[in-house]
């Protein structure tokens, strides 16, 4: 792109922090390097962090040495659980304003703290940048549908929406019969929720005689909690008022919330997201086996280091989330050339199945289901019978849309053939009537291990 053309694009894009978002990659890396030095000094004052680095003969101050960064030990759940209940807490308890926790679906939940500065300055800035990039505007009426309690999703959105100047209706998930009316009567213009919950709301609205396309005023959605295919997002957008855009959003409890990835007006259609806060959440995309950086176009695991977080920072935290680094990570027409582009989350390294020697990700199965006109997109599961995830067979359970012009047996045959073509192996398919399988308001549980 010529400099004059780049200037025209940038003038048409709304940036929250133009002094950072328009930097070239080299400038972002230089900013990260300065922050790593400061982070090393902070961690050097914490005995737990010193002990963690000492395991491999290093010291937190080694964070300031660019040549040593790749040798710094990664951080995993076992490291946190060994230091229960407040692992690697780097601020005095009286300075901690809020705790959140991981879901604890595979063990004891882990608590992460936020200081007052983390909440009022860091999270406010990070989430405001996310909102601006997605096209939310100050003054928008926002249905906030992520969960509350100790889960980070809802409270992080609350912090961001307050700082950004949007009007927040912090309802959370659930109460669908009321929410579908409020979406009409309150005239919400933006929403933040899981894509599965939004699809459930669409169905609930139609059951009450409410037409989302005609009766709702939604313009933009920030959809997270689980990754869904571009086909699923397109179907959601088709149900909404004309012009509605469903943006993928990505984050983690360990990063501080849904503050890492968001699509912009240019990366939405290619199904990619910017690592929008890479200046404060350093993200590596590494081969999950070798922990070496992947090349553009390759799949790797996201490993993060929180550079500015005062309480409960993480250094080289293995998220286990797998993504494809974009073919041109630093070439987005929006001008955010220093903030890399990644694809949607395609699975987790610990969700990966090996069926008769072939690696299978749940996202690949979801792609097939979402592309079929007679399936219920938000309702499917994979049943396996062994815990080591190296399998002889697996069963995919789906629902047939009510009123579909095919029988359960016909749909089973069609999906079996399409999955074989997509994956290269045969999977058992179990077709159920609509309404049989569980619905999820937040993160969906897709892989079920049966006794």
Image (cartoon, helix red, strand yellow):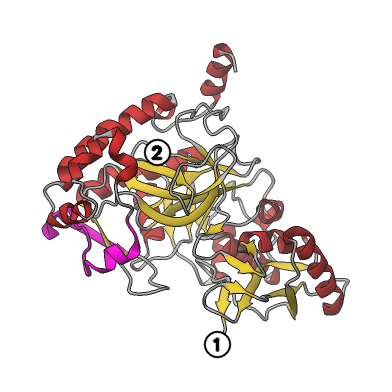
Q: Nearer the viewer, residue 408 or 292?
A: 292
User: Which residue matches tag 1?
Assistant: 451
Q: Residue 83 lies in magenta, yes or no?
A: yes
Q: Nearer the viewer, residue 426 or 395?
A: 426
Q: Is residue 107 visible?
A: yes
Look at the image and tell me in which quarter the N terminus lies: top right
Q: Is residue 135 visible?
A: no
The secondary element bearing badge 2 is classed as loop
The secondary element bearing badge 1 is classed as loop
Q: Position of residue 74 (x, y in %)?
A: 33, 53
Q: Is residue 117 above or below residue 433?
A: above
Asked if residue 436 lies left or right of residue 72, the reply is right
What residue is shown at x 69% (from left), y 58% (from top)? 367
Using the image, tell me which numbered label, if any, was put on residue 37. Answer: none
Quadrant of the rendered image containing residue 372: bottom right
Look at the image and tell me in which quarter the C terminus lies: bottom right
Q: How many marks?
A: 2
Asked if residue 304 lies left or right of residue 372, the reply is left
Q: Nearer the viewer, mark 1 or mark 2?
A: 1
Q: Residues within 10 Å of mark 2 (few under 14, many from 20)?
A: many
Q: Residues within 10 Å of mark 1 (few under 14, many from 20)?
A: few
Q: Nearer the viewer, residue 248 or 139?
A: 248
What residue is shown at x 46% (from left), y 34% (from top)? 339
Magenta segment range? 75-100
Using the image, tell me which numbered label, if any, was put on residue 278. Answer: 2
């Amino acid at each position: 792109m010529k400099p004059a053309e780049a200037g025209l694009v940038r003038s048409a894009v709304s940036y929250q922090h133009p002094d950072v978002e328009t930097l070239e990659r080299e400038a972002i890396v230089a900013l990260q390097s300065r922050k790593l030095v400061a982070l090393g000094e902070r961690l050097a004052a914490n005995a737990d962090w010193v002990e963690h680095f000492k395991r491999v003969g290093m010291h937190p101050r080694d964070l300031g040495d660019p040549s040593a960064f790749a040798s710094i030990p990664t951080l995993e759940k076992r490291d946190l659980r060994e230091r229960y209940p407040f692992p690697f807490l780097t601020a005095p308890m009286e300075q901690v304003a809020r705790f959140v926790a991981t879901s604890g679906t595979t063990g004891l939940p882990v608590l992460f703290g936020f200081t007052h500065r983390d909440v009022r300055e860091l999270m406010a800035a990070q989430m405001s940048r996310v909102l601006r990039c997605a096209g939310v505007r100050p003054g928008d009426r926002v249905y906030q549908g992520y969960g509350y309690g100790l889960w980070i999703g809802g409270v992080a959105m609350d912090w961001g929406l307050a700082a950004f100047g949007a009007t927040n209706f912090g309802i959370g998930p659930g109460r669908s019969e009321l929410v579908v009316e409020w979406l009409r009567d309150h005239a919400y213009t933006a929403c933040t929720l899981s894509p599965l919950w939004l699809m459930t709301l669409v169905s609930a609205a139609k059951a009450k005689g409410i037409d989302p396309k005609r009766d709702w005023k939604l313009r933009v959605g920030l959809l997270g909690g689980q990754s869904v295919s571009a086909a699923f997002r397109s179907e959601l957008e088709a149900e909404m008022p004309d012009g509605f855009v469903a943006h993928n959003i990505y984050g983690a409890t360990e990063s501080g919330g849904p503050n890492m990835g968001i699509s912009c007006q240019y990366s939405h259609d290619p199904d990619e997201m910017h690592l929008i806060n890479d200046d404060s959440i350093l993200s590596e995309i590494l081969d999950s086996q070798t922990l070496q950086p992947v090349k553009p176009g390759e799949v790797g695991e996201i490993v993060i280091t929180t550079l500015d977080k005062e309480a409960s920072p993480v250094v080289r935290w293995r998220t286990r989330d797998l993504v494809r680094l974009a073919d041109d990570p630093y070439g987005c027409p929006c001008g955010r050339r220093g903030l890399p582009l990644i694809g949607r989350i395609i699975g987790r390294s610990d969700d990966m199945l090996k069926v008769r020697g072939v690696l299978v990700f749940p996202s690949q199965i979801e792609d097939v289901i979402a592309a079929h006109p007679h399936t219920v997109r938000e309702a499917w599961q994979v049943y396996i019978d062994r815990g080591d995830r190296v399998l002889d067979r697996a069963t995919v359970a789906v629902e047939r849309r009510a009123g579909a012009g095919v029988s359960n047996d016909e749909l089973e045959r069609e999906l079996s053939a399409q999955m074989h073509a997509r994956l290269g192996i045969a999977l058992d398919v179990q077709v159920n009537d609509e309404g049989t399988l569980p619905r999820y308001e937040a993160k969906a549980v897709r892989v079920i291990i049966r006794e």
